[in-house]
Image (cartoon, rainbow, N blue to C red):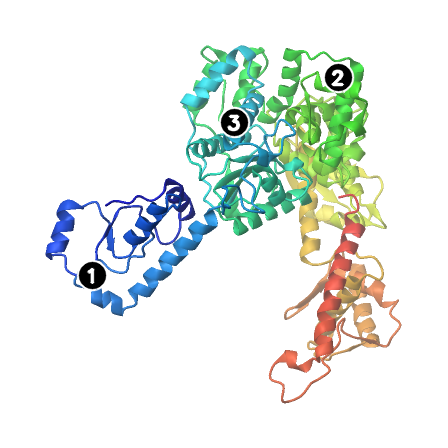
Amino acid sequence: MANSASHRLEQAARHALRGTENRPHFKPIDVGDVVLADTESAIARHIHEHYNDAAAIEMEGAGVAQAAHLTGTLDTLIIRGISDKADPDKNERDAEGSQPQAAKNAAAAAIAILRQLEPANAAGAPAQGVAPASSAAETGGTEAPGSRSRQERLDLARGGALGRRLVLLRPVPAHRREAVLEWMSEHPEPALVVPEGQVRVLVGPMGAGKSERAGRWLEEGLGVAELDDGVEHPVWLDARTVTTSLLAAVKEAIGGDPQRPCRTVIGDLDSPAPRQADQLLDEARHLVLVWPMVIVLATSREGVKAAPEERLNAAVWPWERGADLLRCVLGEEPPRAAWTPEAPLLVMATRITGGKQIDTSPLQLLSGLARDIVERERPQADDQTWDRLARLATRILTYLEPVPAASFGTDPQVWTLTETGLVVDDEAGLRVALPLFEQYFAAHALRSGAVGLGEAAGARSFPGWRYALAAFAVSTVPEETAEQWMRRLARANPAAPSWILDEIGRPRRLPVHREAPEENTDPSVEAGRRLREAVQAFLAGFGACGTQLAHHHDGQLVQWGARLHGRGLVLREAREATQPELVLLPDGPLDSALATGWQSGTAFDMPAGHLERWRWSRERLSEPLARLLRQRRLPLPAGSPLERERVWFLAQPTMKIRHHRWTEPVIPLADLRAAVAEMMNRVNASPMSRWQSGSAQVDSHDIRWINERLTGLPSEHLTPPRPLPDRRSPANRRPWQDYSPELTVSIPTDVLRDAVTGYRDLVTENFPRF
């Protein structure tokens, strides 16, 4: 008699045991009342001749299966751990402990399958505390997720997937969308691979097709769920709408704990504040650890803190595939060289159909896409509605979350926004239909003056405004305006123009012809002035460390000397002079320049491209800033715990240099002041001095700094910043044994407190606008 495993239990087993260390086999098992240990016996030959599909034999399972069958209500699944090959080596395998190991493997499999199953009460309803799987991510109404049937939940998920795909196809002319949908279904991309119980982040620039690829991955999982009741329907969550925890959002979407395989997408992980994005990613890691049946795929632009093994780069399309899609969108042969792999395909198609320029950077293509769509669809909106759209985008980017409709305006005002087709009003609140529109209207607010550049570049608001500033503002305005904006941004927050330069890259824009210098102004001096202006704008945005990033004298940037040589520029800094700010550098040998008060300088190709002087200025200041960080020489406010530590750590090498060896636990201040005074004589007589004795080394900056602090120290001795051991004994073999339990607790507590306080001091003193 044959007994088959129940379909429900078999599917649960297949999913529960997928990817486990001991690979399961779902095959028939023969049952008999003998122990088989001879492959040539009559029973072995009988099994081979009549039941040759059997993968194993066993003695007990048939009785259990038959009893369950007779009840008419119980499902069965036989799990066997294989301990031997039913051959003459059986006894040897048993002696090696194969049976306990086989039992252990079978028990582990049984536990995994039980965890996969939802317990049910006698009536067949979910047990208390367990809700049937459902989706709140694709609701479309107020019905509770748990009240829907599985088919209703799948239908809603399928509708949500189609809706997202249609939104992504908005750049495509309406009469070509059906053809493009058909093309996509007939030309599927290679599926993304995300291992079960893992988190992956698909990273790429705006327009790289991240949402489209994630959508295909989710639809693939939806197809599996439609065929297999043991698989949960997939969940799509926009990062900004996750207002509680990720686990709570997933449980709300499916109506309970994620006990079955469940694909989850976190869209636009970079759209909330960076801290919230980091928290979401941490919650995703925790989610798959606690619920290993869950698979998480997030999409993000560059900047997300994903581990290397979690990162998936959005690969560019092969040329043939891209050209084929362009052909489908256009309905005709695309122009020669119309597409390059790094260019957004659908954006290119939109530009071509509108007769617009396509020989430009990907970022400029994207920045023009929103305008192209708006011009094509011509939404019915007056000037007041347009201003409200800009105000809504401003609210969203400033607070990085959907805006409650009631807090934004009256019902008629909200209706005018949604009627444009550019704004969605759902349970989460008001949001812009496409991220492109969000950036487009935010840039409109910047250009109109409704939002100031300093406000958008502020430390709190810049994470939300960074793409609007880079892609839709600085890269699209005339060059003269872009230069003015960069100057204002650098003064408001030096990190803002630095990030913008990286984001926009080097656009395919030819250098613009500049007006000739004013009469009586030397071209060399004018070239130096443009570079100095950018450096000064960056320095103005820094705090106390600004004067250490470039050579200053009496608090002022020293004089520069400049001379053009063809395409190159020779630039030198004066030793002490500050006025006039720029002069023509004497045309002579280096020795004569040094003799007349100039320091050694540099020669380089004059930055001539769009925004290139800002790149040059950033690079010029980056190395001094990195050096300050490496050498721990950032300025500190008086009284900072890090200031006290630094006095001690500079005093030690100073004493070692003076005495060639210093091992005393305290330092006499009189001796330290004498050493520093001697070094100050050399500091005042040269631009830069350095001292070294073994591993101890200091320079002019260090000596100036400690000299200023020594005058305010009241005691006669300088002691270490932490207490000395209080239980020294020859019997102690380890350094930590010299400390009492009280000091062992208090020292780490004090170190942690001072570290947090000192870090805050460093940031507020040196980077107040970052």
The CA span between labels 3 and 2 is 31 Å
Q: Amino acid at mark 1?
A: Val
Instruction: Please give the residue where the numbered disc 3 appears in the rendered image.
Output: 155
Q: Residue at x 53, y 43 (%)?
A: 126
Secondary element at image label 1? loop
Instruction: Please give the residue where the numbered disc 2 appears in the rendered image.
Output: 416
Q: Amino acid at mark 3?
A: Asp
Q: In this orientation, which residue lies closer to the viewer: 100 or 399?
A: 100
Compared across the picture, whether 78 is left or right of 699 comes to left
Secondary element at image label 3? helix
The x and y percentages for residue 182 are 45, 18
The x and y percentages for residue 655 are 74, 73
How many numbered discs? 3
Mark 1 and mark 3 residues within 8 Å of each other at the beta carbon:
no
Instruction: Please give the residue where the numbered disc 1 appears in the rendered image.
Output: 35
Q: In this orientation, which residue lies closer to the viewer: 765 or 420?
A: 420
Q: Residue 22, located in which quarter of the rendered image?
A: bottom left
Q: Residue at x 64, y 12 (%)?
A: 377
